[in-house]
């Protein structure tokens, strides 16, 4: 409550992709824009006030081909510890 759904969706996208990366000198060599997740759609949950579903897309470059573990940890690793949201 109190946070616009667009802001919450963007925060989830960042938290689960490049939002927790540490800045180092080599950042000039890599564009974070290329690797960040993006919240591309938000819709209200039917019958639930102030609840929304956020759709987030991730660049394929974030995932190792055939690695379910890599995909799982990339998507849910940081998000479940994200205190800014009440529920996922």
Image: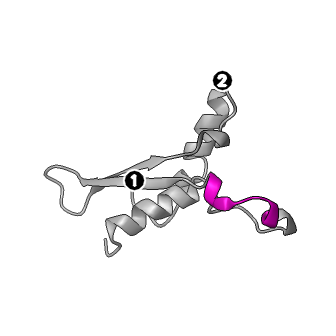
Residue 47 to residue 84: above or below? above
The colour scheme used here is one colour
Per the picture, the main secondary structure of the magenta-coloured stretch is: helix
Q: Which mark is residue 27?
A: none
Cα distance in 3D space between marks 1 and 2: 25 Å
Q: Position of residue 13 (x, y in %)?
A: 51, 56
Compare marks 1 and 2 and give the one earlier in the sequence. Answer: 1
At mark 2, the secondary structure is loop
| Crowdedness near tag 1: few (<14), some (14–19) or many (≥20) residues, C-alpha within 10 Å | few
Q: Position of residue 48 (x, y in %)?
A: 18, 55
Front position in the image: 83 or 17: 17
At mark 1, the secondary structure is strand
Extent of the magenta region: 27-34
Residue 24 to residue 15: above or below? below
Residue at image location 45% in from the left, 49% down from the top: 56
Q: Is residue 66 left or right of residue 45?
A: right
Q: Which residue is mark 2?
A: 66
Q: Residue furthest right?
A: 25
Q: Which is in the foreground here, disc 1 or disc 2?
A: 1
Residue 24 to residue 47: above or below? below
Q: Position of residue 2 (x, y in %)?
A: 32, 76
Is 8 inside the magenta-drawn segment?
Answer: no
Residue at image location 36% in from the left, 65% down from the top: 6
Residue at image location 33% in from the left, 65% down from the top: 5
Is 32 inside the magenta-drawn segment?
Answer: yes
Q: Residue furthest bottom?
A: 2
Q: Residue furthest top?
A: 66
Residue at image location 80% in from the left, 66% down from the top: 28
Q: Position of residue 24 (x, y in %)?
A: 83, 67
| Crowdedness near tag 2: few (<14), some (14–19) or many (≥20) residues, C-alpha within 10 Å | few
Q: Which residue is mark 1?
A: 40
């Amino acid at each position: 409550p109190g946070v616009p759904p667009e802001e919450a969706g963007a925060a989830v996208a960042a938290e689960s992709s490049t939002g927790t990366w540490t800045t180092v000198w080599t950042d000039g060599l890599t564009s974070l824009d290329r690797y960040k997740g993006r919240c591309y759609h938000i819709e209200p949950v039917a019958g639930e006030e102030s609840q929304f579903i956020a759709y987030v897309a991730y660049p394929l470059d974030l995932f190792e081909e055939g690695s379910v573990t890599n995909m799982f940890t990339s998507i849910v690793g940081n998000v479940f510890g994200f205190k800014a949201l009440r529920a996922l």
